[in-house]
Image (spheres, rainbow, N blue to C red):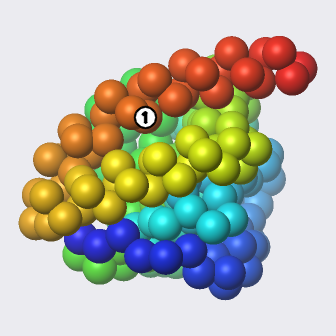
Amino acid sequence: MSVVDYDPRWPEVYASELSTLHTALDDLMVRGHHIGSTAVRGLAAKPVIDILLEVRDLGRLDAMSDAMQAIGYRPRGELGIPGRRYFSKGGDARTHHVHAFVRGDPRVGEHLAFRDYLRAHTRIASAYARVKREAAARYRHDPDGYVKCKQEFVARTVREAIAWAAREG
């Protein structure tokens, strides 16, 4: 696992993949969002594009797993988050993650608040980059350890981001 410097091509990679997803899912997809560290200009990140999809119906999305597999995604179910459908692309060398929620799910707002908060607060984004680099160095071959190492920082920052988003309104 490696955390790399920001790549200015990441927004283009996201836009291209979103177009592919839209074609595969057609009217099931309401909206897509670039989330995660690759969505924050200048932020170091694992080179994996995270995409949040707002969909009309999770049951219909489940029924379209063949369409997702046809464009390279592995369906992973909720993967620990009730009400989410998670897909990964790229096998062990993952290139994309899709997190799908029904339109209106409050976790959509949480993800967007976190992203927007980091975009607006470069000092916090820089601190997050340090945490991520330290976690990646310490847990190079342990993805669960990497996530746990970042967990406290992320949880605190999500709370701050939600409060900030409510004030910004």
Measuring 69% from the left and 42% from the top, which residue is drawn there? 121
How crowded pointer 1 is (Cα within 10 Å; few <14, some 14-19, many 20+) is rated as some
**Percent x, y of residue 52:** 61, 49
Q: Position of residue 23 (x, y in %)?
A: 73, 71
Residue 77: percent from the left, percent from the top? 35, 43
Residue 86, placed above or below residue 154? below
Which residue is the extreme one toward the front? 123
At 56% from the left and 74% from the top, the residue drawn is 6
Q: Quadrant of the C terminus?
A: top right
The quarter of the rendered structure image containing the N terminus is bottom left
The residue located at (66%, 21%) in the rendering is 162
As rendered, which of 128 and 70 lies closer to the eye?
A: 128
Helix, strand or loop at label 1? It is helix
The answer to whether residue 81 is above or below residue 115 is above
Q: Is residue 80 left or right of residue 36?
A: left
Frontmost residue, 131 versus 1 = 131
Residue drawn at the location 49% of the way across and 66% of the way down: 44
Which residue position is annotated with label 1? 154
Among the 4 quarters of the image, the one containing residue 21: bottom right
Q: Is residue 33 above or below residue 136?
A: above
Q: Nearer the viewer, residue 143 or 154?
A: 154
Residue 102 higher or lower than 64, as above or below: above
Image quadrant in which you'd find residue 148: top left
Q: Is residue 13 visible?
A: no
Q: Say left or right for 149 vs 50.
A: left
Q: Does the image show residue 50?
A: yes
